[in-house]
């Protein structure tokens, strides 16, 4: 049974995140404070101690009995609530509301499907947009018949997202070819290695490369792709080398924090059950067009896209 505190009283919120509370976390806190009186506590959840002593996080939450535990990222969320198919009441939180903020709770194994979490105490915000939306974004730029998915087999997340993207493309009768980038994620690949990889990809004549590999490989891969006239779509937000990624997504961390606070506030101040809220999809996501890449490729965005996209370079 979920515990509850007196209505209208000060709410205690435990924030669990890696490192210091930065832009997303700060915006979330400010958003909650606009909704009511809140006191925040934060146990130590740095990356270098997270996997060594995960039980400490759960023990601290049980000791302080907050009105809400907020987790940032998949590793911390799994440490607090466990995966959807391995919920152990003795090890994980089941009687205190938990609200997560992360890229994709289904891919992380926290939930088995979109929608409600299946757990009375769990809800959250999914930062990433869906694969079907990614297909629509590429189609909004140009007609697509073939997509090459480039992913890292060393990343479970990339493998799972590649599978979902493959299915989304096939539902639209778009041809799909898969390519694995086998270099270590932290390795810096040179132009020769990237050229060899792109020789294979070029044979499939893709309209876009859907990029699910390490950021460390982007510069060399993008240079080789651009020289062959192949644009890249990256579904992850980030700052990339100028003229490299034609399309990617932009997430306003401040807007995301405020949006997440509105959703979490339903649990704290409107007495909504976490399990009834399920996944909320983050709305402050915009498509980004790199005009330098467009000029190099000579593939320019249509006017309709220019009216809604974030334009860079």
Image (cartoon, helix red, strand yellow):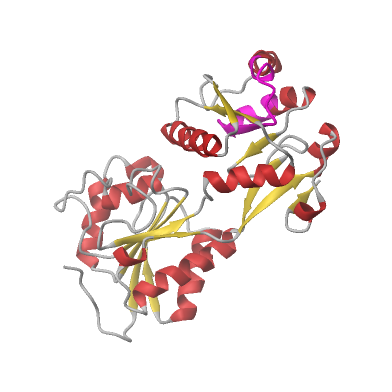
Relative placement, left or right, of 69 versus 166 is left
The residue depicted at 17 percent of the width and 49 percent of the height is 88
Considering every residue shown, the one lying at the far left of the view is: 90
Position of residue 52 relative to residue 204, above or below, is below
Please count the marks in the image: 0
Considering every residue shown, the one lying at the far front of the view is: 173
The residue depicted at 28 percent of the width and 65 percent of the height is 97
The residue depicted at 68 percent of the width and 14 percent of the height is 199
Asked whether residue 248 is in view, the answer is no
- Where residue 233 appears, as percent x and y from the top left, is 65, 38
- Where residue 202 appears, as percent x and y from the top left, is 69, 19
Task: Tell which of 51 and 96 is nearer to you.
Answer: 96
Task: Tell which of 132 and 57 is nearer to you.
Answer: 132
- On the image, which quarter does residue 198 sit in? top right
Residue 14 lies within the magenta run: no
Relative placement, left or right, of 49 versus 221 is left
Residues rendered magenta in the picture: 200-221
- Where residue 74 appears, as percent x and y from the top left, is 39, 47
- Where residue 2 appears, as percent x and y from the top left, is 20, 69
Position of residue 267 relative to residue 309, above or below, is below
- On the image, which quarter does residue 265 sit in? bottom left
Asked whether residue 64 is in view, the answer is yes
Considering every residue shown, the one lying at the far bottom of the view is: 8
- The quadrant of the image that shows the N terminus is bottom left
The residue depicted at 36 percent of the width and 66 percent of the height is 277
């Amino acid at each position: 049974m979920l515990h509850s505190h007196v209505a209208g009283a000060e709410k205690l919120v435990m924030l669990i995140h890696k490192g210091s509370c930065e832009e997303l976390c700060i915006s979330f806190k400010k958003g909650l404070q606009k909704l009511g009186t809140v006191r925040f506590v934060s146990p130590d959840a740095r990356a270098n101690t997270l996997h060594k002593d995960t039980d400490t996080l759960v023990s601290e939450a049980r000791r302080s009995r907050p009105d809400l535990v907020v987790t940032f990222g998949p590793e911390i969320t799994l440490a607090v609530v466990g995966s959807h198919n391995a919920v152990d009441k003795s090890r994980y939180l089941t009687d205190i509301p938990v609200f997560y903020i992360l890229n994709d709770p289904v891919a992380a194994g926290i939930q088995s499907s979109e929608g409600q979490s299946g757990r009375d105490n769990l809800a959250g915000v999914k930062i990433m947009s869906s694969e079907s939306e990614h297909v629509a974004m590429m189609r909004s730029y140009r007609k697509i018949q073939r997509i090459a998915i480039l992913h890292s087999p060393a990343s479970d997340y990339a493998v799972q997202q590649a599978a979902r993207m493959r299915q989304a493309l096939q539902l639209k009768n778009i041809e799909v070819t898969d390519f694995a980038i086998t270099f270590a994620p932290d390795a810096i690949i040179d132009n020769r290695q990237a050229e060899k990889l792109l020789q294979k990809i070029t044979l499939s004549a893709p309209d876009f490369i859907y990029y699910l590999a390490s950021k460390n490989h982007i510069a060399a891969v993008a240079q080789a792709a651009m020289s062959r006239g192949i644009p890249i779509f990256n579904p992850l937000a980030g700052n990339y080398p100028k003229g490299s990624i034609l399309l990617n997504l932009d997430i306003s961390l401040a807007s995301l924090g405020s949006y997440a606070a509105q959703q979490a506030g339903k649990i704290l101040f409107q007495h909504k059950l976490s399990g009834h809220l399920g996944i909320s999809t983050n709305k402050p996501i915009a498509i980004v067009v790199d005009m330098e890449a467009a000029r190099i490729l000579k593939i320019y965005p249509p006017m309709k896209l220019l009216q809604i996209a974030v334009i860079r370079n």
